[in-house]
Image (cartoon, grey):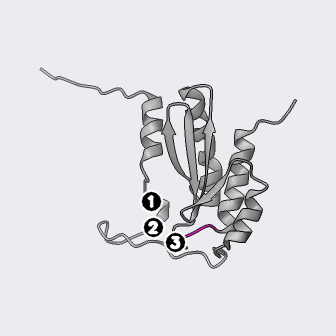
Amino acid sequence: MLSLKFLWISPLVIGTLISHVHAVTLTDFEEQTDPFSVQPRASSPNQSFTLLSEAQIQSDLAQLPGWIYQDAAIHKVFTFPDFVAAIAFVTQLVEPAETASHHPDLKIAYNRVTVTLTTHDEGGVTVQDIVMAHTIEAIATPPSP
């Protein structure tokens, strides 16, 4: 007798798990001849990841209410009506982060999403982090009617 077992996982649970795991995608690596040898792709020469001074960061954060600079990163906690709205917000961050190839660190705690931006390779905040913070603000703040 054939026995099949299925495991169903709620899409909300999957979204939560994904937000807590820093996943490596195939696009992060060049095509390899040896599938067990993984070498990071070289940075594009067009990418300019120059660290900003603390004065530059504070000046930029003046235009981003609620964002703080701490531990070589910028952070903001977004609060939503409920867990579903928090997950919907996180889902909206996927496309711009993938397009920019610059991904925020996210922490979800029920209806709160903590967003942390830093350029890990540079060890601090760059223009790309400030640009992504503005993008995230635009997503979190719906246009006024």
Q: Are marks 2 and 1 in contact (CB under 8 Å)?
A: yes
Q: Which mark is residue 144?
A: none
Specify the farthest residue to the right. Answer: 145
Q: Residue 27 at what x, y percent from top left?
A: 49, 61
Q: Nearer the viewer, mark 3 or mark 1?
A: 3
Q: In terms of image quadrants, where is residue 35?
A: bottom left
Q: Are marks 3 and 1 in contact (CB under 8 Å)?
A: no
Q: Residue 19 at what x, y percent from top left?
A: 48, 44
Mark 1 Cα within 10 Å, few/some/many (few <14, many 20+)? few
Q: Residue 80 at what x, y percent from top left?
A: 62, 31
Q: Nearer the viewer, residue 44 or 76?
A: 76
Q: CA distance from mark 3 to mark 1?
A: 19 Å
Which residue matches tag 3? 121
Q: Residue 1 at what x, y percent from top left?
A: 12, 20
Q: CA distance from mark 2 to mark 3?
A: 15 Å
Magenta highlight on residue 123: yes
Q: In terms of image quadrants, where is residue 83?
A: top right
Q: Nearer the viewer, residue 128 or 82?
A: 82
Which residue matches tag 2? 29
Q: Nearer the viewer, residue 138 or 34?
A: 138
Q: Secondary structure at mark 3?
A: loop
Magenta highlight on residue 137: no
Give amino acid for label 2: Phe
| Magenta region, residue range | 121-125
Give amino acid for label 3: Asp
Which residue matches tag 1? 26
Give amino acid for label 1: Leu
Specify the farthest residue to the bottom. Answer: 45
* Residue at 67% across, 70% down: 54
* Residue at 38% across, 70% down: 32
